[in-house]
Amino acid sequence: MKKCGKPAPHKALLLLSIIDLIERGVITNCRVPLSDDLVRQFKRNTSALLGESKLFQPVANYPYYHMKSEPFWQLVANPSCQIDKISNYSLPNIRANIAYARIDEELFNLLQNPNVRAKLRVTLITKYLDNQPTLADNLPLILFTFSTLASLVA
């Protein structure tokens, strides 16, 4: 999705949040529930990397559901629920209907490597967050993040 020619940052912010939780040991397998930890990390990343966007107001439940269109992301329904019948994407409704998302096992295994996580972070930030209208307000944080990532990769 684009708005005013800018790529939507929602999925990138969700992926960055998942990477952060994998790195901290909160997510330990291919199952990614829409947990309070994930929602909090998504909010932290949104605030730090996007700031107060004039175009987008990301919330974790929307990209969590809509990532189902990505080949590495599969939603697993709670018993007696049908994912294709979900039309209300609110956080309580997503949690009531979806047990967890399953990320591709090969991707999860790659994300165990700090160098891969660092490179993916840089790619996501560069492609989806660099040209957002408020990113300049967060330039010191971004430069710090890139210098930290560069030291990890080196």
Image (tube, rainbow, N blue to C red):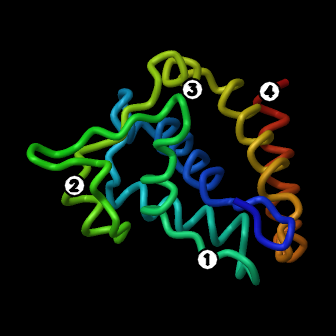
Q: What residue sits 86% from the left and 66% below the top?
A: 5
Which residue was labeled with disc 1?
57
Mark 1 or 2: in front is 2
Q: x, y percentage for residue 74?
A: 40, 35
| 131 or 81: nearer the viewer | 81
Amino acid at pointer 3: Leu
> Residue 53, located in which quarter of the rendered image?
bottom right
Mark 4 or 2: in front is 2
| 13 or 142: nearer the viewer | 13
Which residue was labeled with disc 3?
111
Which residue was labeled with disc 2?
97
Amino acid at pointer 4: Val
Q: CA distance from mark 4 to mark 1?
A: 32 Å
Q: CA distance from mark 3 to mark 4?
A: 14 Å
Callout 1: helix, strand or loop?
loop
Disc nearer the start of the sequence (1/2): 1
